[in-house]
């Protein structure tokens, strides 16, 4: 049986991480915190259209759609500029001020 070299094992590991780390990053940070690290800096939050916190299934579906190649083009081509990962999952990104004003 032929052994794989370090470079081959590393490239498999790197390829795995290039796909799965971003997927789990978006899914879990939005499901747990309602925002990614970038949304902490921009002071925005992801909500669904009924103004309730997203659950794990909502975030999973949102992340799966985000990873399709066509999702990138929807921002450029749609008149409302709402990407597919928001329109199909009935979610929106709102400012933290919006959440504070609505729920105080």
Image: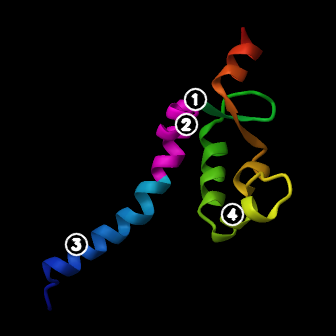
Residue at x-position 67% and y-position 20%: 97
Question: Label 4 crowding class (10 Å Cα cut-off): few <14, some 14-19, many 20+?
Answer: some
Q: Which residue corresponds to mark 3?
A: 10
Q: Is residue 84 left or right of residue 55?
A: right
Q: Nearer the viewer, residue 79 or 62?
A: 79
The magenta segment is 24-43
Residue at x-position 82% and y-position 60%: 78
Q: Which residue corresponds to mark 4?
A: 71
Q: Nearer the viewer, residue 28 or 71?
A: 71
Q: CA distance from mark 2 to mark 3?
A: 32 Å
Looking at the figure, which quarter contains the N terminus? bottom left
Q: Is residue 21 left or right of residue 34?
A: left
Q: Is residue 101 magenta?
A: no
Say if mark 1 contacts mark 2, CB within 8 Å.
yes
Q: Which residue corresponds to mark 1?
A: 43
**Would you place residue 33 above or below residue 7 in this image?**
above
Return the disc, 4 or 1, that comes first in the chain's sequence: 1
**Would you place residue 68 above or below residue 92 in this image?**
below
Q: Secondary structure at mark 3?
A: helix
Return the disc, 2 or 3, that comes first in the chain's sequence: 3
User: According to the image, what is the colour scheme of the structure?
Assistant: rainbow
Question: Label 2 crowding class (10 Å Cα cut-off): few <14, some 14-19, many 20+?
Answer: some
Q: Is residue 96 left or right of residue 38?
A: right
Q: Secondary structure at mark 2?
A: helix
Closer to the camera: disc 4 or disc 2? 2
Closer to the camera: disc 3 or disc 4? 4
Q: CA distance from mark 4 to mark 2?
A: 19 Å
Question: Label 1 crowding class (10 Å Cα cut-off): few <14, some 14-19, many 20+?
Answer: few
């Amino acid at each position: 049986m032929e052994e794989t070299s370090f470079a081959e094992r590393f490239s498999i590991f790197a390829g795995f991480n290039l796909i799965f780390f971003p997927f789990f990053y978006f899914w879990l940070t939005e499901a747990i915190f309602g925002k990614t690290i970038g949304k902490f800096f921009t002071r925005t939050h992801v909500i669904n259209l009924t103004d309730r916190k997203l659950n794990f299934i909502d975030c999973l579906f949102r992340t799966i759609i985000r990873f399709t190649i066509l999702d990138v083009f929807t921002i450029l081509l749609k008149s409302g500029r709402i990407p597919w990962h928001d329109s199909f999952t009935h979610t929106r990104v709102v400012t933290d001020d919006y959440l504070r004003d609505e729920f105080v």
